[in-house]
Structure formats: C-alpha cells, structure tokens
Amino acid sequence: MWSDFHERVQVCLNDLKSRVPAAFTPRAVLTLGTGLEGLKERLTGAVSISCNDIDIFSPVASPVHEKSLCLGYWGNVPTAILVGRMHLYEGYHPSQIAMPVNLLASWGADTFIFSNAAGGLDLSMRPGQVMLITDHINLTGHNPLTGSHIPSWGPRFTDMSQTYDRKLLTLARQAAARAGITCHEGVYAGLSGPSLETPAETRMLQMLGAKAVGMSTVLEVIAARARGARVMAVSAITNVNNPENMRPVSLDEIIAVAGRAGQDIERIVSAVLTDAYS
Ligand code: HPA
C-alpha cells in the first residue's frame, strides 16, 4: 500500500478545488450505499467527478460498483456526495477505504452521513424499512487506523465510546416521526463479505446484539471519528435473515429493495442536514 497517503490526498484536494468555485467548501458528506444512488439528484449546482479520475480512488481491476463524487448544495448546505464507496471485498486496502473521509475532512467537512444496504437480523423488520445505526461491531478484521500514523488525521487510539452523534440521531428520529416513517434503531455488524452469512453466522450476530449486517460503513466511520467529525449512519434493510429459515438473497433484490427505502432515507437525511446547520 502507498506510503505517501498524506501527499496524495493533498494533490487530490488541490485538483478537486480547481474544479469548483473557490467559495465552495463541503461541510457535509453523504455516502450512498448500494441501491441508494438516486439521492444524488437532490444536489443543486452539482459538479460530478468520476472516481476513475481521482487518484486516491484508483480503481481495482474489476470494481463491483461505479463510483463518483458529486459536489453541490443540499438545500443551503455545501455537500459532497460519494456515489458508491470502496469495499474490502473489491480488494481495496482499509486505509484506501478511509481516503475519501480523510480527503473531505481535510477540505473542511465536519459531518458525515453514511447510508448502506443491510440485511435485517431483527425478525420484526420488513424489507424496505430503515434502521438508524446507534452503534456498530467491526467484524471485518481490519481497521483503517493501522499502519503509518498521520497525526493531523487524528489519534491512533481513537475513542469509540460515543460514535454515532446523539444530536443527529435525535434529529433523524424526529424527522422519521414527523414523516410517519417506521424507523428501527440498532447495532450494525460490519463484515468484509462478499459471501453472505450462513445460518450459524446469522445466529451468532443476533446473539452479539446486532440488528443489521452489511459489508461497509464501519471502516469509514472509524476514520471519520478519528477526524473528530459528527457521524450518522442509516441502513436500508433489504432482506431479513431468519437463521431458522434462511433464503438466498441476490444483488438484484438488494438493489431493488434499497431503492424503495431511498425515499424514506432521503426525507430523514434532508431534515437532518437542514436542522444540523440551523
Ligand atoms: N448480509 C450482508 N450484507 C448485506 C445483506 C445481508 O443479508 N443484505 C444487504 N447487504
């Protein structure tokens, strides 16, 4: 892996700054998970950059998802939207997965909202519903803060005692209640994938107290907390996994069902972004 992360991020940052008006500094960052790409349409005055043109996203041989970075305004809030993200299962290194966070935090972003598609582990959930992540279990076996330490990117031994911002969670809850959205809350278990879980693994995750399982988010959240940013994360529950009666899930199904949850996530995120800066 690269030894010159810091320099590469600075070069990327200068390149991105040259593509937008000088007054533009993203404050909020929204990462869109599988099936949730439609939310990027909410940005106004957006400049969209393919991640193939951004060095730190250097594509792996066969990326599973197309990725781009959109810079614009969500209402009045200057926002960066990452359409797609890097996953361990695509072959990216943990510190590379954290690079977009470090890039945008170095630019000045202070609030990171992550969305993802996830499998539900609470049998009261229905596909297409939404879950606010209140905490996580990193079961990937990786951590973006390993390797060479860059002090300006945060402490090596980053505190994770209060990872998901309480105020943002309250705003999200209130927004969901106002809009009549059924909104679950719970612990997200992050795995590396890409194979899905066996019934025994599903049972184990339930015993650990997880309510949703997915293959993203935890490494980016760790990097964002290291940077001292406010973090919120929300899952689109695309399937519900009952260990006593497991059914196969397909990527097509995950994408289609996440799309259905997209409208609810958009409403919640929209209210959070407006209220978080007012
Ligand atoms: N498991 C892991 N990741 C997922 C799932 C699942 O059931 N559904 C969507 N992403």
Image (cartoon, rainbow, N blue to C red):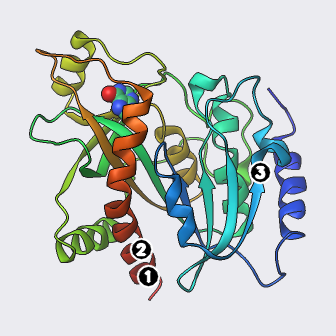
Mark 1, residue position: 274
| Distance Cα–Cα, label 2 vs label 3 | 24 Å
Which one is earlier in the sequence, the residue at label 3 or at label 1? 3
Above-or-below relation of 205 to 230: above
Which one is earlier in the sequence, the residue at label 2 or at label 3? 3
Q: Which corner quadrant of the figure contains ligand 1?
A: top left
Q: Residue at x 48, y 36 (%)?
A: 216
The secondary element bearing badge 3 is classed as: strand
Above-or-below relation of 121 to 231: above
Q: Nearer the viewer, mark 2 or mark 3?
A: 3
Q: Is residue 229 visible?
A: no
Compare residues 7 and 15 and report the one nearer the observer. 15
Q: Residue at x 76, y 41 (%)?
A: 57
The secondary element bearing badge 1 is classed as: helix
Asked if the residue at tag 1 contacts the one at tag 2, i.e. Cβ–Cβ closer than 8 Å, the answer is yes
The amino acid on which the numbered mark 2 sits, given as a three-letter code, is Ser
Above-or-below relation of 82 to 158: below
| Distance Cα–Cα, label 3 vs label 1 | 27 Å
Mark 2, residue position: 270
- Beta carbon at label 1 within 8 Å of ligand 1: no
Q: Is residue 58 visible?
A: yes
Question: Where's the N terminus, which quadrant?
Answer: top right
Q: Residues within 10 Å of mark 2 (few under 14, many from 20)?
A: some
Question: Where's the C terminus, which quadrant?
Answer: bottom left
Q: Residue at x 58, y 47 (%)?
A: 223
Q: Residues within 10 Å of mark 1 (few under 14, many from 20)?
A: some
Q: Nearer the viewer, mark 3 or mark 1?
A: 3
Mark 3, residue position: 50
The amino acid on which the numbered mark 3 sits, given as a three-letter code, is Ser
